[in-house]
Image (cartoon, rainbow, N blue to C red):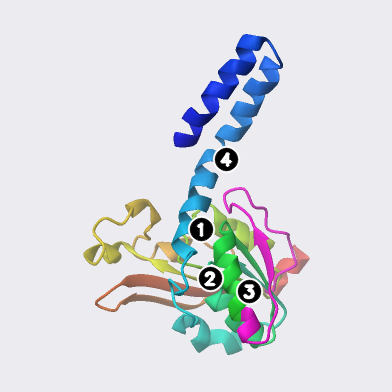
C-alpha cells in the first residue's frame, strides 16, 4: 500500500498536464498486480540479507533419507531460498534449477554451491506468476512454501517417471507459532490430495515438539507418457 501512495502524486501530475493520461492509468492497473509480489520480494530480501543462513545450510532429512530413490537428471527447486536443498541435489549429480522471488536468497545459494563445488541455475520469479516448463524436470522439490494451486501444476508438468518431494508446516505447528497464518498451513492428510495422478511413495506427518510438518514423495506413472 505504501507503493500505491508514492505513485499517485506523479500520476496526478501527468493527468493534470494532459500528457498520456490513459497510458498512465493503464500502467497503474498493470503495476497493481505486482504490488504484492514486490512486497514479498522486499520482505524476503531483508530476511536473507544476513551472513547467517536463516534456515541452515543442511538439507532437510526427508530429502537426504530418500535421495537415492529420485531419478537422476534435471531437478527444479521451487522457493529455493538460500539453496540448502538444491545444492545438496547438485552434489548428488542433479542439474538443478532454482526459482525464488529473492535475489538475496540466491546470492547465498550460489555461495553455498561454490563452497560445495557445484553449479546452480537460478530464476528470480514470483511463483504465483511462474509457469513450469513441461516435461523437462525429473524431480520437482518444494519445501516450506505453500501455494495450493501450484502443486497440481507440478504434477502436470513433471516428466513421466519423475518424482515430487514436498515438505511444509501443518496446522499442528500453531502449537509452537500461534500467530502463523493458517492459510499457509496444511490440514491433516491434505498433502495427500494435492498431487492428482501421482503415486505416493512416502508420506509422513511429524511433530518434533518444536515444529509440526508433513512430507511427501510421489511419482508420476511412466504410463502417463502414453496418454
**For the residue labelled by badge 1, is the local secondary structure a helix, a strand or a loop?**
helix
Name the N-terminal-most of marks 2 and 3: 2
Q: Given this view, does label 4 or label 1 mark the residue nearer the observer?
A: 1
Callout 4: 10 Å neighbours few (<14), some, many (20+)?
Answer: few
**For the residue labelled by badge 2, is the local secondary structure a helix, a strand or a loop?**
loop
Q: Nearer the viewer, residue 24 or 130?
A: 24
Q: Is residue 113 above or below residue 121?
A: below
- The residue carrying mark 3 is 110
Q: Is residue 183 above or below residue 88?
A: above
Are dots 4 and 3 in contact, CB under 8 Å?
A: no
Name the N-terminal-most of marks 3 and 1: 1
Name the N-terminal-most of marks 2 and 1: 1
- The residue carrying mark 1 is 45
Would residue 81 appear left or right of 181 to someone viewing this image? right
- The residue carrying mark 2 is 82
- The residue carrying mark 4 is 34
Q: Identify the magenta region.
A: 113-138
Amino acid at each position: 500500500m505504501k507503493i500505491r501512495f508514492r505513485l499517485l502524486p506523479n500520476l496526478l501530475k501527468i493527468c493534470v498536464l494532459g500528457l498520456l493520461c490513459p497510458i498512465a492509468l493503464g500502467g497503474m492497473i498493470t503495476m497493481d498486480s505486482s504490488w504484492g509480489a514486490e512486497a514479498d520480494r522486499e520482505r524476503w530480501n531483508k530476511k536473507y540479507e544476513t551472513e547467517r543462513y536463516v534456515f541452515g545450510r543442511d538439507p532437510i532429512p526427508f530429502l537426504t533419507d530418500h535421495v537415492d530413490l529420485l531419478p537422476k537428471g534435471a531437478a527444479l527447486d521451487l522457493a529455493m531460498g538460500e539453496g540448502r536443498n538444491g545444492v545438496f541435489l547438485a552434489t548428488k549429480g542433479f542439474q538443478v534449477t532454482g526459482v525464488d522471488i529473492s535475489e538475496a536468497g540466491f546470492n547465498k545459494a550460489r555461495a553455498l554451491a561454490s563452497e560445495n563445488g557445484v553449479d546452480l541455475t537460478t530464476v528470480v520469479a514470483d511463483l504465483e506468476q511462474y509457469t513450469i516448463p513441461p516435461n523437462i524436470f525429473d524431480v520437482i522439490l518444494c519445501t516450506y512454501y505453500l501455494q495450493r494451486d501450484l502443486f497440481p501444476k507440478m504434477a502436470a508438468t513433471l516428466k513421466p517417471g519423475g518424482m515430487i518431494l514436498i515438505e511444509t508446516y501443518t496446522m499442528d505447528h500453531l502449537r509452537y507459532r500461534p500467530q502463523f497464518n493458517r492459510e499457509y498451513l496444511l490440514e491433516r492428510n491434505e498433502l495427500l490430495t494435492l498431487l492428482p495422478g501421482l503415486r505416493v511413495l512416502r508420506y509422513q506427518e511429524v511433530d518434533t515438539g518444536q515444529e509440526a510438518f508433513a512430507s511427501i514423495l510421489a511419482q508420476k506413472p511412466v504410463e502417463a507418457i502414453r496418454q
